[in-house]
Image (spheres, rainbow, N blue to C red):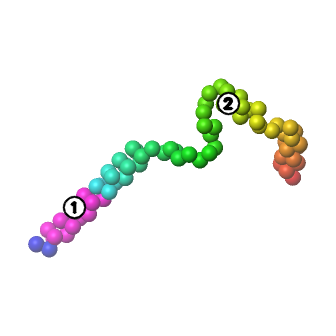
Amino acid sequence: MEENKKLVWWVAGIIAILVVAAFLVYYLRYTPVGTGDYGILPPSDTTQSIEADLNATDLNNLDSELSDIDKELAQ
């Protein structure tokens, strides 16, 4: 009788673990990732929007920054 109770607890524990694992797999698989608006990407992917972003990018000091990076890597 005592052995049957232990077996019931083992089976119940295994079933509980399997139910939790199935829930986690379902939740993680079907939850959309990266849907938040973090303000990193441009609001549109039209040619005009991309061109405006490129024109707004400051590349004037790029050479000095690259030389600074080279100096740091040489140390």
Q: Is residue 28 magenta?
A: no
Between 70 and 65, the residue placed more toward the observer is: 65
Q: Main secondary structure of the magenta part?
A: helix
Q: Position of residue 25 (x, y in %)?
A: 37, 49
Disc marking residue 11:
1
**Amino acid at dot 1:** Val
Q: In the figure, 54 relative to 35: above or below?
A: above
Q: In the figure, 55 relative to 23: above or below?
A: above
Q: Is 16 on the left-hand or right-hand side of 51?
A: left
Classify mark 1: residues with Cα within 10 Å, few (<14), some (14-19) or many (20+). few
Seen as rendered, the residue at the extreme top is: 47
Task: Give the extent of the magenta segment.
Answer: 3-17
Q: Position of residue 72 (x, y in %)?
A: 85, 50
The residue at 21%/61% (across/down) is 11
Q: Is residue 10 magenta?
A: yes
**Amino acid at dot 2:** Ile
The residue at 50%/44% (across/down) is 35
Classify mark 2: residues with Cα within 10 Å, few (<14), some (14-19) or many (20+). some
Instruction: Find numbered disc 2 in the image and state the secondary structure of the residue it sits on.
Output: helix
The residue at 87%/47% (across/down) is 68
The residue at 67%/27% (across/down) is 48
Between 31 and 26, the residue placed more toward the observer is: 31
Q: In the figure, 15 relative to 41: above or below?
A: below
Disc marking residue 50:
2
Seen as rendered, the residue at the extreme bottom is: 2
